[in-house]
Image (spheres, rainbow, N blue to C red):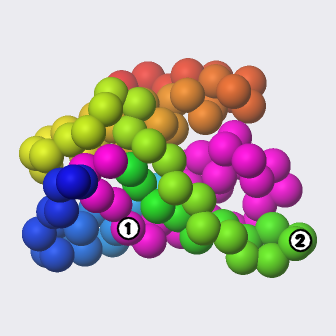
Amino acid sequence: MSHTFEPQVIDAVLAHMNGDHTEDNLVIARANGHPDATSATMTGLDGDAGVWSVTDPAGEHELRITWPGGPISERPEIRREVVVVFEAAAAALGLPPREH
């Protein structure tokens, strides 16, 4: 059974991703099956995966990406896994790596 994070944790992550990382969400969507995505919004997460709502010319789709490091249960692990998902997506699209 997947770990469920507290609603306030999920809300904070979603607010951060959708407020500060809108372009990152789009990179993630484009590299994970939606190359023509025009928008992407993170809509949820649990211990197994992150979930995005993606819009492309064909309509709206749900994109669920399993955490690369396996199931998680602690808040700090969310950031780590989202960063890995983004970095893999950027590399798949040939984008230069970000400096941390």
Q: Which mark is residue 44?
A: 1
- Regarding residue 94, the answer to whether it shows in the image is yes
Q: Is residue 3 magenta?
A: no
Residue 45 position in % (x across, y down): 34, 60
- Regarding residue 83, the answer to whether it shows in the image is no
Q: Would you call the spot at circle 1 few (<14 residues within 10 Å), some (14-19), or many (20 or more)? A: some
Where is the C terminus found, in terms of image quarters? top left
Residue 51 position in % (x across, y down): 46, 61
Measuring 38% from the left and 39% from the top, which residue is drawn there?
A: 67
Q: Which residue is mark 2?
A: 57
Q: Is residue 76 left or right of residue 81?
A: left
88 over 64 or under it: above or below? above
Q: Is residue 64 left or right of residue 57?
A: left
Q: Would you call the spot at circle 2 few (<14 residues within 10 Å), some (14-19), or many (20 or more)? A: few
70 over 27 or under it: above or below? above
Q: CA distance from mark 2 to mark 1?
A: 23 Å
Residue 68 position in % (x across, y down): 41, 31
Q: Which residues are magenta?
A: 23-48
Where is the N terminus found, in terms of image quarters? bottom left
Q: Secondary structure at mark 2?
A: loop
Task: Identify the mark nearer the N-term, 2 or 1.
Answer: 1
Q: Amino acid at mark 2?
A: Pro
